[in-house]
Image: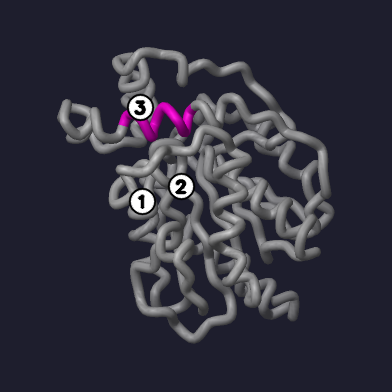
Amino acid sequence: MSNSADDNLWIRRFHHEPNTRVTLVCFPHAGGSASFFYPVSDAMQSTMQVVALQYPGRQDRREERPLTTIAELADASFAALRPLMDRPLAFFGHSMGATVAFEVAVRMKRELAGAPVTLFASGRRAPSRHRVETVHQLDDEGIVTELKKLSGTDARILGDLELLRMILPAIRSDYTAAELYRYLPGPTLDCPIVALTGESDPKVTLEEAQAWADHTTGGFELRTFGGGHFYLAQHQREVINLISDQLLSLTLQGRI
């Protein structure tokens, strides 16, 4: 697998690459970082290469300007991942990351006539389902309240003012990108889409999750789990098994 300057900035590998055909690419949620997916890489290290994207403005990239549109995030992610596209890739995106993953898949379709072998869209409504949301317009206290409500950020960080000052600009930029995103009709994907959602997620209704089916001709499945927006924390093993089973099934069918 090639490495470039952009790869070093954008792509994180936590474990040695096993001898497998498929690479799972993970796209973090708003305010999230590549390290969120370390447990996924750890659990799958003997069976699959897992890489995670690191957006600007967080962790080791905190000195960089955060990006404020999904288009910017998708363009840069596509450029960073392009050297990897000579082998099968599967995409897993959570929340905002699902939208970024979708837009990268659209760019693959448009520019390379390719696609991920599967797009796993977690905790996010379909691109064509818009909601008016204004978290990005709140003051810092309001954004922290939203983070606490969704339980997606370590409580220790939310209580540490110095750490909060470091991460809030990236979080605000991500919310701006996610909330101002508007789907522009384009190529319909031809890869399978698997939508995953928590049954009590305030950010996604079942109808909004089901609408991912409209964005592909390659088959669709909706899987629900107990829990809210970050159901992943409670169902990590089940989600990892779902990913593994889906990719094994495609391999056995000769589609990978």
Give me the residue at 48% from left, 70% from top: 4
Location of mark 2 (residue): 28
Q: Position of residue 10 (x, y in %)?
A: 45, 57
Tell me the SS state at disc 2. loop
Does 161 lie within the magenta span?
no
Q: Is residue 30 above or below residue 5?
A: above
Q: CA distance from mark 1 to mark 3?
A: 15 Å
Q: Which numbered disc covers residue 83?
A: none
Q: Earlier in the sequence, mark 1 or mark 3?
A: 1
Location of mark 3 (residue): 147
Q: Is residue 97 left or right of residue 139?
A: right
Q: Earlier in the sequence, mark 1 or mark 2?
A: 2
Tell me the SS state at disc 3. helix
Q: Position of residue 78 (x, y in %)?
A: 61, 56
User: Which quarter of the rendering shows the C terminus?
Assistant: bottom right
**Residue numbers of the magenta segment:** 168-175
Overall secondary structure of the magenta section: helix
Q: Is residue 13 above or below residue 151?
A: below
Give me the residue at 78% from left, 45% from top: 215
Q: CA distance from mark 1 to mark 2?
A: 7 Å
Instruction: Give the residue type that dot 2 points to.
Output: Pro
Q: CA distance from mark 2 to mark 3?
A: 15 Å
Q: Is residue 52 above or below residue 195?
A: below
Mark 1–mark 2 CB contact (< 8 Å): yes
Q: Can you tell which quarter of the image residue 248 is in? A: bottom right
Instruction: Give the residue type that dot 3 points to.
Output: Leu
Mark 2–mark 3 CB contact (< 8 Å): no
Q: Position of residue 6 (x, y in %)?
A: 48, 62
Give me the residue at 47% from left, 65% from top: 7
Location of mark 1 (residue): 36
Query: From this viewpoint, which residue is outermost toward the bottom?
Result: 19
Instruction: Give the residue type that dot 1 points to.
Output: Phe
